[in-house]
């Protein structure tokens, strides 16, 4: 019975990603579709970069530097981040071999993979926090819930406009969100004895490498192809504001 509330908190936080997919139900006119996609791609890349540089990288680096000496801590941080950069490029090459070569579809799948890997350790952290201290778990769960919603946008919008299938967009977003309760279950069944702050920090630095590379190498160039620079700026600023607000709430 003690695990039910921590598992529920992790599940709600993870499945909130699906709320971001509701934007695909907006009635966008044909003349505004390019503007909307540009805004959403820019918003998504802004969210990914901001989460990485304001949360994942500084917090994980601080933990690793406090656990190890300065040189060893820096080396571990750099290696974790660089492996993330390399991994997303490998995944990208694999996805390029798919039958559906639509760039938006590829971006949606890459975002789904990156955010699944992001949500997995988040689920572990939320579950373990709530298991030890329910108030801490609730606070962490709310923070994760709030920044998972814009992450859902980054998966659902490219998938929907590539496939014109709302079900495909929601399904891919749901799969990403389910990684969070999966992380919680794995934490309870298999990993509780082995999970350390250092291990979670390494994983999150790896994820930061994935997300920053995806944002700069894939999302930004695709947004630029629509030649709606004004909406790129709107998207970037909106992403920054949303992420900053999630830290203040």
Image (spheres, grey):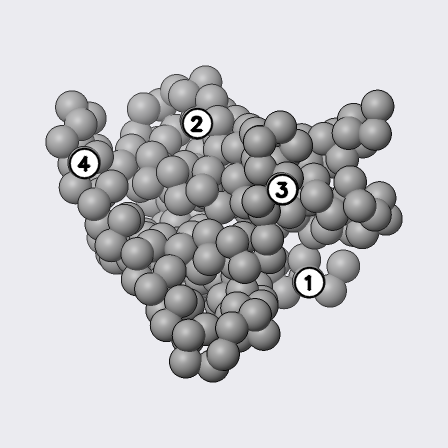
CA gap, disc 3 and disc 2: 31 Å
The single residue placed furthest to the bottom in the displayed view is 70
**Which residue is under mark 1?**
247
- Pick the residue in front: 245 or 201: 201
Mark earlier in primary sequence (3, 4): 4
Secondary structure, mark 2, is helix
In the picture, the disc for residue 172 is: 2
Badge 3: how crowded within 10 Å, few (<14), some, or many (20+)?
few
Q: Nearer the viewer, residue 97 or 155?
A: 97
Front of the two marks 2 and 4: 4
| Residue 173: numbered disc | none
Spatial distance from mark 2 to mark 4, Cα to Cα?
18 Å
- Which residue in the protein does label 3 denote? 193
Name the mark nearer the viewer: 1 or 3: 3
Say whether residue 117 is left or right of residue 132. left
Q: Which residue is denoted by mark 4 in the rendering?
A: 94
Please give the name of the residue rendered at 62% of the width and 42% of the height, measured from the top-left corner: 193
Residue 161, image x, y percentages: 35, 31
Nearest to viewer (mark 3 / mark 4): 3
Q: Secondary structure at mark 1?
A: helix
């Amino acid at each position: 019975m003690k695990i039910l509330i921590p598992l529920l908190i992790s599940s709600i936080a993870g499945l909130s990603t699906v709320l971001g997919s509701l934007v695909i139900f907006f009635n966008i006119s044909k003349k505004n579709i390019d503007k909307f996609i540009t805004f959403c791609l820019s918003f998504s890349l802004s969210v990914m970069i901001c989460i990485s540089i304001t949360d994942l990288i500084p917090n994980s680096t601080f933990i690793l530097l406090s656990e190890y000496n300065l040189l060893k801590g820096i080396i571990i941080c750099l290696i974790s981040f660089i492996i993330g950069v390399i991994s997303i490029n490998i995944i990208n090459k694999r996805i390029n071999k798919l039958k559906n070569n639509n760039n938006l579809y590829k971006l949606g799948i890459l975002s789904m993979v990156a955010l699944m890997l992001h949500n997995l350790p988040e689920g572990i952290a939320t579950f373990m926090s709530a298991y030890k201290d329910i108030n801490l778990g609730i606070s962490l769960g709310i923070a994760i819930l709030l920044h998972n919603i814009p992450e859902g946008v980054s998966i659902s919008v490219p998938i929907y406009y590539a496939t014109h299938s709302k079900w495909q967009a929601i399904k891919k977003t749901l799969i990403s969100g389910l990684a969070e309760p999966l992380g919680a279950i794995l934490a309870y069944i298999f990993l509780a004895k082995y999970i350390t702050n250092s291990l979670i920090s390494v994983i999150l630095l790896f994820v930061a490498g994935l997300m920053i590379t995806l944002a700069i190498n894939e999302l930004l160039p695709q947004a630029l192809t629509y030649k709606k620079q004004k909406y790129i700026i709107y998207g970037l600023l909106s992403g920054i504001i949303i992420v900053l607000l999630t830290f203040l709430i």
